[in-house]
């Protein structure tokens, strides 16, 4: 948001205080998404792909899309780009704590959850490692979005592989579950076994590790005239997927466009349609985790445009119906009326 304000000349006659408790900005994650609209960070993209697969029950389904590439952004490059841009404006300053400044007459854009989030709710938790192999073993043209050929432990579990080159890939183990079951969190071991047994890679070195837990529920939001919640804390996560990055870019553009009347305009939200559909989807997921590999697998048996637009909040009614028609009717109807 700070970058968007700066490049649109909104910080010429206003000051911006960024309260950040990190010691330094360095690569801590890899943001991936389908590029359904232009964003400011093409120069931070590690790689773009036009092909993706989803695997379940030893089957693989491949989709191709030239219009909306899947992109991965290196957060290290993103932080560098933004820091160097902001450092050119003396109206922007960094602080460690809110009490270091007088914010009495300021608007606060808050990206910190107000209270500790409930671990018994549904989360997407994961760990990824970027591995480098001696031999060229990856098909760098195809990403694997979800591979359900792994132990589910009564939850939903899949691996995700992004080949950055023939000998370098980000491999992630991802769970959709509560955060209380510690037995799901031996991520190192899960990755080691998957890389050895499923990808058939024996020798590799680890260049980078990332780890996270994204709440698949909306935190209670308190938007008042002074505080506007942004980022994950502002409800920008698509709950059925965890995708947040591009929604944040869209929210930032909305804020910048309306900055002069930000207290009067309506609060930016992901579409109500997706909020409802995701709520039903997650109810089904919670009740029937064992059915999810099949449900996800079938969901992708549609045109690549349809599934990408649906997962990126860009689908029209016909595309929604197309996706819904792939779902088991009775289970979803029960969840809908629950
Ligand atoms: C490892 C990882 C991988 C992810 N991958 C993807 C992806 O591929 N695609 C996607 O769309 N989304 C992804 N996400 C979701 C991700 O959360 C968002 O894309 C995005 O980073 C959220 O932005 P944010 O501003 O809400 O939070 P953050 O990026 O976490 O920023 C919050 C900032 O607030 C600071 N902070 C926290 N507490 C305080 C405090 N008390 N005082 C001062 N500062 C504080 C933090 O240091 C941090 O810099 C991923 C998340 C993680 C953790």
Image: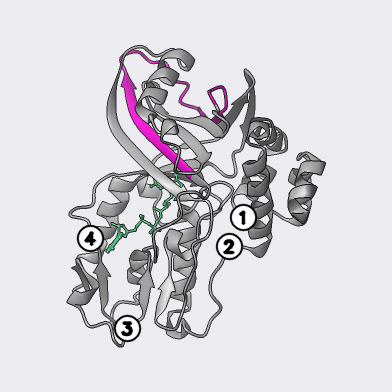
Instruction: Find numbered disc 2 in the image and state the secondary structure of the residue it sits on.
Output: loop
Q: In front: mark 4 or mark 2?
A: 4
Q: Which mark is residue 313?
A: 1
Q: Which residues make up the magenta segment?
A: 124-151
Can you identify the residue that label 3 sits on?
Answer: 106
Name the residue located 49 percent from the left edge and 71 percent from the top edge. Answer: 254
Name the residue located 57 percent from the left edge and 27 percent from the top edge. Answer: 148
What's the distance in space between the residues labelled 2 and 3, CA to CA? 26 Å
Q: Considering only order in the chain, which callout, 1 or 2, is on the residue closer to the N terminus? A: 2
Q: Which mark is residue 270?
A: 2
Instruction: Find numbered disc 3 in the image and state the secondary structure of the residue it sits on.
Output: loop
Around disc 2, counting alpha carbons within 10 Å, would you say few (fewer than 14), some (14 to 19), or many (20 or more)? some
Q: Nearer the viewer, residue 113 or 83?
A: 113
What's the distance in space between the residues labelled 4 and 2, CA to CA? 28 Å
The image shows residue 255, relative to residue 81, as above or below, that is below
Can you identify the residue that label 4 sits on?
Answer: 21
Q: Considering only order in the chain, which callout, 2 or 4, is on the residue closer to the N terminus? A: 4
The image shows residue 222, relative to residue 41, as above or below, that is below
- Dots 2, 1 in contact, CB < 8 A: yes
Q: Considering only order in the chain, which callout, 3 or 2, is on the residue closer to the N terminus? A: 3
């Amino acid at each position: 948001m700070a970058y968007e304000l700066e490049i649109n000349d909104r910080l010429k006659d206003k000051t911006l205080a960024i309260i950040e408790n990190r010691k330094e900005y360095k690569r801590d994650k890899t943001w991936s998404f389908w590029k359904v609209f232009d964003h400011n960070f093409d120069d931070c993209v590690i790689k773009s792909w036009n092909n993706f697969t989803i695997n379940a029950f030893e089957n693989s389904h491949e989709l191709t899309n030239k219009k909306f590439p899947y992109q991965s952004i290196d957060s290290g490059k993103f932080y560098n780009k933004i820091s160097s841009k902001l450092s050119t404006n003396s109206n922007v300053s960094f602080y460690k704590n809110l009490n270091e400044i007088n914010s009495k007459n300021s608007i606060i854009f808050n990206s910190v959850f107000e209270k500790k989030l409930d671990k018994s709710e549904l989360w997407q938790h994961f760990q990824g490692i970027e591995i480098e192999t001696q031999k060229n073993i990856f098909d760098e043209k195809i990403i694997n979005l979800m591979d359900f050929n792994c132990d589910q432990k009564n939850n939903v579990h899949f691996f995700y592989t992004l080949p950055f080159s023939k000998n370098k890939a980000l491999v992630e183990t991802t769970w959709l579950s509560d955060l209380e079951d510690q037995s799901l969190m031996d991520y190192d071991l899960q990755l080691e076994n998957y890389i050895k047994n499923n990808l058939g890679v024996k020798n590799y070195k680890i260049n980078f590790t990332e780890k996270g837990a994204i709440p698949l529920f909306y935190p209670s939001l308190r938007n008042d005239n002074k505080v506007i919640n942004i980022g994950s804390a502002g409800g920008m996560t698509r709950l059925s997927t965890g995708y947040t990055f591009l929604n944040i870019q869209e929210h930032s553009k909305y804020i910048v466009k309306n900055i002069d009347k930000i207290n009067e305009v309506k609060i930016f939200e992901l579409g109500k349609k997706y909020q409802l559909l995701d709520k039903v989807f997650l109810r089904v997921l919670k009740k029937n985790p064992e059915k999810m590999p099949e449900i996800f697998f079938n969901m992708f048996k549609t045109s690549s445009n349809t599934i990408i637009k649906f997962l990126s909040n860009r689908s029209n009614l016909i595309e929604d119906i197309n996706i819904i028609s792939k779902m088991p009717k009775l289970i979803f109807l029960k969840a809908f009326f629950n």
